[in-house]
Image (cartoon, grey):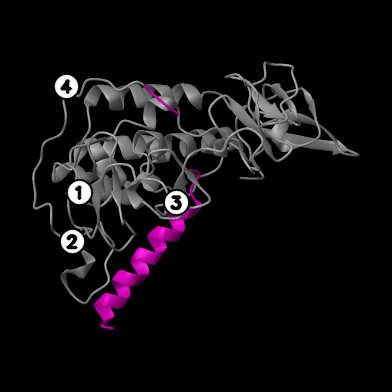
Amino acid sequence: MTRTATVHLLAAISTALVVAGCPSTNDASQKDASAATIVTSHDAGVDAEADDDVRPVYDVSPNEPPEPHALRLCKALSEVQEQKRAACCKIAPGVVLTDECSRMLGAAVRTHAVTLADADIDACVTALEKRYDGCDWVGPFPPGPPPECTNLVKGSLADGARCRSTVECAGASHCAGLTPTRAGHCSAPSSDSAPCGGTVDPLVGFARQSGAEKTHPECEHRCIQHKCGAPFKDGAACSIAAECEDGSQCIAKKCAKAAPAKAGQPCPGGLCESPAECIQGVCGSKKAAGETCSADFECKGGCRKADAGKGTCGPRCDVR
């Protein structure tokens, strides 16, 4: 392998590892009134089979100037939380992923593979500022991006078109066959028995588009244990609620008819009515600063221990 090929391979592996470690919500689609429309060659760097070098699907020169819409969204998604945490903890901001996000998303915008609307970006920025207001949330389990930010990259490519991310595909189609180093093609959700899951979509990870799992499903029915198939009926063995039919949950390792529990009720299947969460087997809300606790996940921020396992909820700057 040439030195250039080696460099590209390491870059691709780095991208896959970073995205796999990122924390992987529905929101109503807004009319795309002011989409960015800068054009370059869509096929540049798309297909790893074009030559002998192994390259990431978004093989974009670092000297390429940022696309304004992509840069604004990526700065908000990557930096707002870190800047707020740094201010609360009175420390310098840590590592952010703005450049990688902007590079990939900018390439998708420039090739007309996706569109971004100014109104959607505005809504995302406003929601991020609200979500990370104050310091009570600082701790090992900070809240992820709000719904306004997780489904605003709109795909434009028709079925059969070469794609570098699922969010490049129009409608409910997904990018079948995609890997961090090989482009896929836009395709309708797969039929039962087709393989699914286990792939890395770099743009979805860096741009934090977690809504893509629902808006661009891999399967007609469900992806269960890496294979497309119908959800399990009541009485069937299961490991998580997503394997069971709608209206059922996985309780005692079997699918059983059960609605999400209300606040204050037990949640044996792990599902609660929004906005409640299943915390230590009971539906409720994260505790606010000053309330007693025994573990970090009980709190909006973290559990600051005092003695013998007892503690008080509040910001925790010593852990991430």
Q: Is residue 26 above or below residue 238?
A: above
Q: Find numbered disc 4 in the image and state the secondary structure of the residue it sits on.
A: loop
Q: Are marks 3 and 1 in contact (CB under 8 Å)?
A: no
Amino acid on which disc 3 is placed: Gly
Q: Is residue 18 visible?
A: yes
Q: Are marks 1 and 2 in contact (CB under 8 Å)?
A: yes
From the viewer's side, name the closer residue of 70 and 255. 255
Which range of residues does the magenta coloring cover? 1-27
Distance from Cα at disc 3 to Cα at disc 1: 25 Å
Residue at which label 1 appears: 107
Residue 116 position, x and y percent, is 22, 32
Residue at which label 3 appears: 197
Query: Relative to residue 280, is residue 151 drawn left or right?
Result: left
Instruction: Give the number of the disc on residue 221.
Output: none
Distance from Cα at disc 1 to Cα at disc 2: 10 Å
Q: Which residue, as the protein is rendered here, is positioned at the far bottom? A: 1
Amino acid on which disc 1 is placed: Ala
Amino acid on which disc 4 is placed: Ala
Residue 13 sits in which quadrant?
bottom left
Quadrant of image for the N terminus: bottom left
Q: Residues within 10 Å of mark 4 (few under 14, many from 20)?
A: few
Magenta stretch containing residue 74, yes or no? Answer: no
Residue at which label 2 appears: 45
- Foreground mark, 3 or 4, reads 3
Magenta stretch containing residue 26, yes or no? Answer: yes
Work out whether mark 4 precedes mark 1 in sequence or the reverse, and give the earlier one: 4
Query: Relative to residue 210, is residue 152 drawn left or right?
Result: left
